[in-house]
């Protein structure tokens, strides 16, 4: 049978990961305590899948076959659908706010923002206007607003990216 592990509780939802029937990977599930129904979030039994974060309306989950190359997905609890938002080497999750997600990619490098309303991904470090910046650091994500700091020369500056308008 399947052995459940890594159980997490968020509001009335119980998240768990279970080994696949083939035993070579795992799948993500959640039990909706309000509706009394089990839902399967992921279905790739050949990969290692983990719940990364959730706010109760959306969840971010990761999938990796080799611990190096990974993927992030956004799961919508209202539609029970997952959307792949990135597939890359060296992913580091930074934060989520509703259907908006931020992550860092080590080999690019890049601070990325996924706007769940538009389905658009933006690399905030891949902007010629910020070419003189160094030591960029993610500071926070609220709604579609993402803040990071960086050095320009010897000055530390804060940047605000407004995901709804695409402006910095």
Image (cartoon, rainbow, N blue to C red):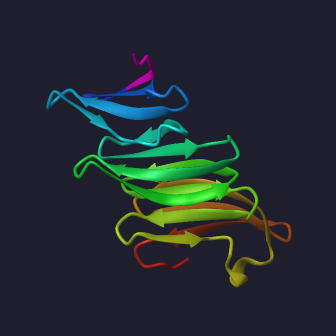
| Most foreground residue, 150 or 128 | 128
Q: Residue at x 54, y 53 (%)?
A: 140
Percent coordinates x, y for residue 27 in the rendering: 43, 34
Which range is magenta?
Answer: 1-8
For the image, the number of numbered tags is: 0
Is residue 111 found inside the magenta-colored segment of the image?
A: no
Q: Residue at x 37, y 72 (%)?
A: 118
**Image quadrant assignment for residue 18:** top left
Q: Residue furthest front?
A: 22
Q: Residue furthest bottom?
A: 128
Check the picture and name the quadrant holding the N terminus.
Answer: top left
| Most foreground residue, 27 or 76 | 27
Check the picture and name the quadrant holding the C terminus.
Answer: bottom right
Percent coordinates x, y for residue 148 in the rendering: 63, 61
| Most foreground residue, 40 or 137 | 40
Direction from residue 138 to residue 81 in the image, left or right? left
**Image quadrant assignment for residue 102:** bottom right
| Most foreground residue, 86 or 159 | 86
Direction from residue 13 to residue 146 in the image, left or right? right
Direction from residue 65 to residue 46 in the image, left or right? left
Q: Main secondary structure of the magenta part?
A: strand
Q: Residue at x 51, y 69 (%)?
A: 121
Percent coordinates x, y for residue 133 in the rendering: 78, 71
Q: Residue at x 48, y 28 (%)?
A: 22
Q: Residue furthest right?
A: 154
């Amino acid at each position: 049978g399947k052995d459940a592990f890594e159980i997490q509780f968020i509001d009335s939802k119980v998240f768990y990961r279970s080994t696949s029937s083939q035993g070579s990977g795992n799948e993500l599930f959640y039990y909706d305590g309000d509706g009394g129904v089990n839902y399967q979030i992921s279905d790739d039994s050949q990969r290692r899948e983990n719940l990364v974060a959730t706010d109760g309306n959306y969840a971010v989950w990761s999938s990796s076959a080799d611990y190096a190359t990974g993927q992030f997905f956004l799961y919508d609890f209202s539609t029970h659908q997952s959307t792949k938002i990135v597939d890359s080497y060296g992913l580091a999750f930074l934060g989520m706010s509703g259907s908006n997600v931020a992550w860092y990619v080590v080999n690019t490098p890049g601070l990325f923002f996924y706007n769940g309303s538009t389905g658009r991904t933006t690399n905030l470090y891949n902007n010629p206007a910020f070419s003189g910046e160094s030591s960029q650091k993610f500071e926070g994500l609220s709604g579609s607003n993402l803040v990071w700091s960086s050095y320009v020369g010897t000055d530390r500056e804060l940047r605000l990216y407004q995901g709804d308008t695409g402006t910095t």
